[in-house]
Image (cartoon, grey):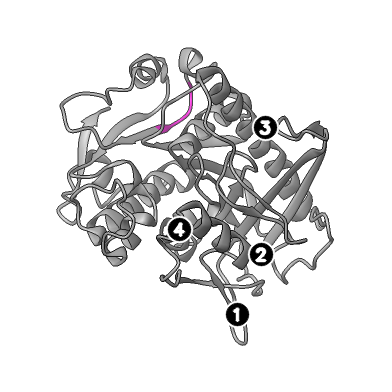
Amino acid sequence: MELHLVDPSRTDPWSEAGQPRELMVTVAYPAANVHGRTMLPWLPQGAERALKARYGGALDAFVLPQTHTADSAPARCGRRPVLLCSPGYAEDRTFNTLVVEELVSWGYTVVTVDHPHDSGEVEFPDGRVVLSWPDGDDDARRTAVAVRAADLRFVLDCLAVLNRGGNPDARRRPIPHGLRGSLDLARTGAFGHSRGGAAAAAVMNLDGRVRAGIDLDGTLLGPVVQRGLDRPFLLMDTAVHDGLNRDASWAAFWPKLRGWRRCLRLVDAEHLSFTDLVALAPQLGGALPLPVGTIPADAAVAGVRATVRAFFDVHLRGRPDTSHVLAGASPRHPEIRYVAG
């Protein structure tokens, strides 16, 4: 289900009119059934038009995919760990659908968050589509990560309201049957790609409710780089040389990690190989060159899915990593390589 969330305690730093901070969120959860439910598109219509306009017509001839996610289906019984997912800069919250749907199928509730003006095309229920601002200097990026961390904390507050039986949606749209009480917020993790990975680390620095986190190839920004973390954290990169990612923030952050830590590599990959775009790129026929490397799309998707799930299974569910993917030693996933731990 979608949630339109409004935080009256914060002003949107990118709003010229001093408007309160607004977010769009999707809560994805295991369904009891999907009978008669519409399967959601990868992007809603307004966001799709804006995305295609961003690329100057290069994508106009392409039909974007449907998801395997049913709109507002009743939730399956049971309490489930909760994962927050933050996209990269100028990416949409749907860009990690392939990983999100996999996690949900294994019994997680995954909450994907769009950060207006920093995410890509954010469509609101009234039809507004908010686009990302041009990327700025390091100070602007640090501000953006701090705003994202505050967004994620606010989302957690709203999820607590929902779990108690309240309705945090700005329009009070109905909450699907069975969703209330199903969120095990004592077992909350966060992950994200690129700037979303930086946000996962930043929110862990600020909020002890987030017990474990993953950064998928994102430069770390803000106080967490020097403070580090005392809870489990996983870094995944695409560097083509030995040792930690060439990003200086990783080298500074790594020795400050005082809990379980691991750095893994997705081999033959590039920056967007962690997103759905690795699966879409081969279908575009060169219409829009994307940095996804030479790794086969199915290997990239399977490897990222397996790694993210194994990490949260270990650290939120207490299950052993029988696949050995976290050690970079999985026969099924040779594309995942151990770097440091």
**What residue is shown with label 4?**
103
Quarter containing the C terminus: top left
Say whether residue 249 is left or right of residue 79: left
- The magenta span reads 229-233
Q: Amino acid at mark 2?
A: Met
User: Do tag 3 and tag 1 residues touch (Cβ < 8 Å)?
Assistant: no
For the residues labelled 4 and 1, the Cα–Cα distance comes to: 21 Å
Given this view, does label 3 or label 4 mark the residue nearer the observer?
Answer: 3
Please name the residue shown 26% across and 37% down the image: 238
Q: What type of secondary structure mainly makes up the magenta span?
A: loop
Which residue is located at x 49 percent, y 59 percent?
A: 52
The image quadrant of residue 260 is top left
Q: Is residue 307 visible?
A: no
Residue 275 vs residue 58, the one in the foreground: 58
| Nearer-N-terminus badge (3/4) | 4
Q: Position of residue 1 (x, y in %)?
A: 66, 64
Give the residue furthest to the bottom: 36
- Report, in whole angstroms, how far the alpha carbon at label 2 lies from the one at label 3: 22 Å
For marks 2 and 1, the one nearer the N-term is: 2
| Disc marking residue 38 | 1
Residue 190, how many percent across, how many down?
52, 41
Q: Identify the disc placed on residue 150.
A: 3
How far apart marks 2 and 1 lie (CA) works out to 12 Å
**Please, what is the three-letter code of the amino acid marked with disc 4?**
Leu
Q: Is residue 270 magenta?
A: no
